[in-house]
Image: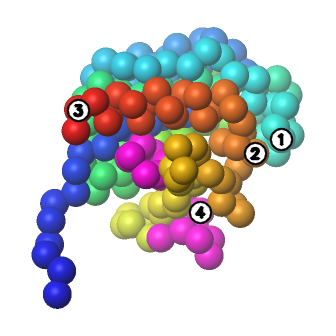
Amino acid sequence: MGSINQASPVLLFLAAFASNDTALDWAKQRAELEFGPIELESEPLRFDRFTDYYAKSMGGVLFKRLWGFRRRIDPATLANVKRLTNDWEEEYAATAVESAPRPLNLDPGYVDLGKLILASTKNHAHRIYLRDGIFAETTLIYTKKQWTPLPWTYPDYQSPEYHEFLNRCRESLKRER
């Protein structure tokens, strides 16, 4: 029988995308108020070059920002974070001047030394139910000194820009351990 151990703290990760800086700045401010200072931030990444899936609900030209937070979290809190970010999306949509039905998309997860986990409200064969309508998936694994996609990994998470950012997140976490 194996010993039961507590999970090590992980780096909270948030991907935010929208068609304008106003939405991204609003999300960043809300996230920092709730989760503390952002330790790592990506440059704006052109999201719509990977897919047009969100064009109808969010607009045609979309930019994504990736944030890694200084304060570490218990991985068991991921469902709470996803429910909160969903509430923020609804709040922003209710007050936004943009005409898109969904002017802001927030995708939280966490980086551990061996994986990137993302939260979702959608069930699928590769997702595990957490609680309260929230699922989690391993989106990338870190093996042989690189991020490795899985059959369901979204195209943007397979890109070098994302891997570079996730390497920085991983290194920050590794220094602490």
Q: Which residues are magenta?
A: 109-128
Q: Regarding mark 1 in the picture, which secondary structure is present there?
A: loop
User: Which mark is in front, 2 or 1?
Assistant: 2
Q: Regarding mark 2 in the picture, which secondary structure is present there?
A: helix
Instruction: Check whether the beta carbons of the residues at disc 3 and disc 1 lie within 8 A of each other.
Output: no
Task: Look at label 3 and name its amino acid.
Answer: Glu
Mark 2 / mark 4, whichever is N-terminal: 4
Which image quarter holds the C terminus?
A: top left
Q: Which residue is mark 3?
A: 176
- Distance Cα–Cα, label 3 vs label 1: 36 Å
Task: Look at label 4 and name its amino acid.
Answer: Lys
Residue 30: percent from left, percent from top: 39, 23
Q: Which residue is mark 1?
A: 51
51 relative position to 108: left or right: right
Residue 162: percent from left, percent from top: 62, 32
Which quadrant of the structure image shows residue 176?
Answer: top left
Residue plotted at (43% across, 20% down):
40
Residue plotted at (47% across, 51% down):
115
Which quadrant of the structure image shows residue 81?
Answer: top left
- Distance Cα–Cα, label 3 vs label 4: 33 Å
- Distance Cα–Cα, label 2 vs label 1: 8 Å
141 relative position to 30: left or right: right
Q: Which residue is mark 4?
A: 122
In the rendered image, residue 119 lying in the magenta stretch gets the answer yes
Task: Look at label 1 and name its amino acid.
Answer: Thr
- What numbered label is drawn on residue 155? 2
Task: Look at label 2 and name its amino acid.
Answer: Pro
69 relative position to 161: left or right: left
Instruction: Check whether the beta carbons of the residues at disc 2 and disc 1 lie within 8 A of each other.
Output: yes
In the rendered image, residue 130 lying in the magenta stretch gets the answer no
Which quadrant of the structure image shows residue 106?
Answer: top right
